[in-house]
Image (spheres, grey):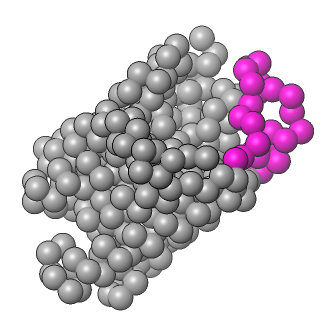
């Protein structure tokens, strides 16, 4: 039960932050990516603000054996740079730049994003369902070592 | 407006606090694409209710906080083809890369993860090139 309470608190903070920061406004997101136009730095402030509590949390996590509710904490970060990390991130970035929406804000603006948002979300969910098959193909071209 | 960056910083702090709660209490990394994607491809297994509750919080809080910023507009494009192509790219891409702006960006970079930093530079670079080409060269977006 407690896991659900804290999952809701975490999701709530995430949704509140995305809404209040302006990150569900596609103009502000595309404005951040528009280095050759009227550059909008808001996203950098959001990212900076978010990394602060998160960096503290990682420091606390390092000193702990397990999470407060008893489950395991994530292991150390992998440093493996592979084709799917780069190819996937480039694909994601292209889609992100195209319309100014990424997965978090898509969900956060569900209640006020209007009907057009559903086209994006439907395609995103479809893409997520296809991803394991795409990864298989990619591994055949560029075998993971 | 001048106060945009203040809202940005404040909202960012809330996002980071959400990630901190999810990490320290639930032992999980707060990555939107991973949380959603695990439900879509069923790799979530028994963690699915926790993910659904998390997402419910993401949807619900903007509704409750609406009076703080009434009339917030997403300025989403009306071009359906563009939305479908972008959604597909975001869906496949984030799952191949195992993360998006929240997982690789907020959670990864804040622990100086090499994968998080490389992924973030890649998607910001690709996003910037996309906007440069399609806005300034072709005038499509």
* A109 up-or-down from A52: above or below: above
Front position in the image: B74 or A120:
A120
x 62%, y 19%: residue: A3
**Residue B27, horizontal then vertical, whole percent:** 69, 30
Task: Kindly identify the residue that appears in the image at 58 percent across and 21 percent down.
Answer: A5
Magenta span main SS: loop
Q: Is residue B108 visible?
A: yes
Name above or below for residue A73 compared with residue A124: above
Q: How many marks?
A: 0
| Quadrant of res A82 | bottom right
Residue A51 visible, this angle:
no
Q: Is residue A58 magenta?
A: yes
Q: Quadrant of the N terminus of chain A?
A: top right
For residue B126, what is the image quadrant?
bottom left
Lateral position of residue B85 relative to residue B116, left or right = left
Q: Is residue B24 above or below residue B118?
A: above
Residue A43 spot, x, y in % from top left: 47, 67
**On the image, which quarter does residue B134 sit in?**
bottom left
- Asked whether B108 or A9 is in front, the reply is B108
What segment carries the magenta color? A56-78
Furthest residue toward right: A63
């Amino acid at each position: 039960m407690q896991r659900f309470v804290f999952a809701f608190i975490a999701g709530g903070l995430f949704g509140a932050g995305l809404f209040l920061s302006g990150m569900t406004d596609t103009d502000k997101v595309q404005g951040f990516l528009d280095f050759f136009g009227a550059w909008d730095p808001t996203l950098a402030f959001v990212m900076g603000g978010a990394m602060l509590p998160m960096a503290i949390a990682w420091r606390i996590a390092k000193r702990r054996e397990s999470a407060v509710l008893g489950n395991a904490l994530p292991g150390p970060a992998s440093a493996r740079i592979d084709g799917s990390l780069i190819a996937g991130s480039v694909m994601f970035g292209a889609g992100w730049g195209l319309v100014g929406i990424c997965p978090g804000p898509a969900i956060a603006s569900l209640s006020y994003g209007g009907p057009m948002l559903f086209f994006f979300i439907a395609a995103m969910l479809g893409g997520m369902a296809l991803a394991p098959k795409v990864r298989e193909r990619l591994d055949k071209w560029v075998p993971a070592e | 407006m001048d106060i945009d960056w203040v809202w940005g910083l404040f909202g960012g702090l809330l996002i980071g606090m959400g990630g901190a709660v999810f990490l320290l209490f639930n032992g999980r990394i707060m990555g939107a694409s991973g949380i959603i994607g695990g439900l879509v491809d069923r790799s979530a297994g028994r963690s699915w209710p926790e993910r659904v509750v998390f997402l419910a919080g993401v949807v619900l809080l903007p509704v409750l906080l609406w009076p703080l910023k009434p009339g917030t507009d997403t300025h989403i494009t009306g071009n359906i083809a563009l939305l479908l192509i972008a959604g597909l790219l975001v869906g496949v891409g984030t799952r191949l890369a195992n993360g998006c702006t929240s997982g690789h960006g907020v959670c990864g970079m804040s622990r100086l993860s090499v994968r998080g930093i490389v992924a973030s530079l890649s998607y910001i670079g690709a996003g910037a090139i996309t906007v440069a080409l399609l806005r300034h060269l072709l005038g499509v977006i």
